[in-house]
Image: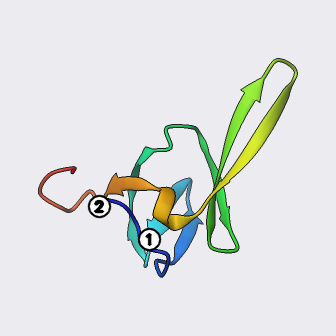
Amino acid sequence: MKLKDTDKLEFVDQTLTVNGKPFVVQYPDEPLFGAEEGKLITIVFKGCGYTQYQWDPEEIEGYFPDSESPS
């Protein structure tokens, strides 16, 4: 499922939470770094450095682990 632009993103204990519920991210499949100003932040290490990417909620795909099946 894709998130909506009204969903509230938080990063708690190395886990993305959406509207207060844990959320498993399938896309983007980069290491999660945090959430800031309503956007997910991922990090990609390249050579001696790294690049951070910001993702709007509607770009994020995944599922809530308490749902029956990831779709």
Q: Earlier in the sequence, mark 2 or mark 1?
A: 1
Q: Which residue is pictured at 42% across the width and 73% down the height?
A: 4
Q: Is residue 60 above or below residue 44?
A: below
**Residue indicated by mark 2:** 64
x and y, in percent, of residue 71 in the image: 21, 51
Name the element at disc 1: strand
Residue ranking furthest to the right: 48
Q: Which residue is pictured at 44% across the width and 45% down the height?
A: 27
x and y, in percent, of residue 16 in the image: 50, 60
Dot 1: within a 10 Å radius of its alpha carbon, few (fewer than 14), some, or many (20 or more) residues?
Answer: some
Side (left or right) of 61 relative to 30: left
x and y, in percent, of residue 40 in the image: 60, 59
Side (left or right) of 60 relative to 65: right
Dot 2: within a 10 Å radius of its alpha carbon, few (fewer than 14), some, or many (20 or more) residues?
Answer: some
x and y, in percent, of residue 11 in the image: 58, 63
Identify the colour scheme used: rainbow
Q: Is residue 21 above or below residue 70?
A: below
**Residue indicated by mark 1:** 18
Name the element at disc 2: loop
Q: Is residue 45 above or below residue 55?
A: above
Image marks 2 and 1: residues in contact by CB distance under 8 Å: yes
Residue ranking furthest to the left: 68
**Amino acid type at image mark 1:** Val
Q: Which residue is pictured at 21% across the width and 62% down the height?
A: 66
**In what quadrant of the picture does the N terminus appear?**
bottom left
When asked about the image quadrant of residue 54, the answer is: bottom right
When asked about the image quadrant of residue 12, the answer is: bottom right
Q: Give the Cα distance between marks 2 and 1.
A: 9 Å
User: For residue 71, which numbered disc appears in the image?
Assistant: none
**Amino acid type at image mark 2:** Phe
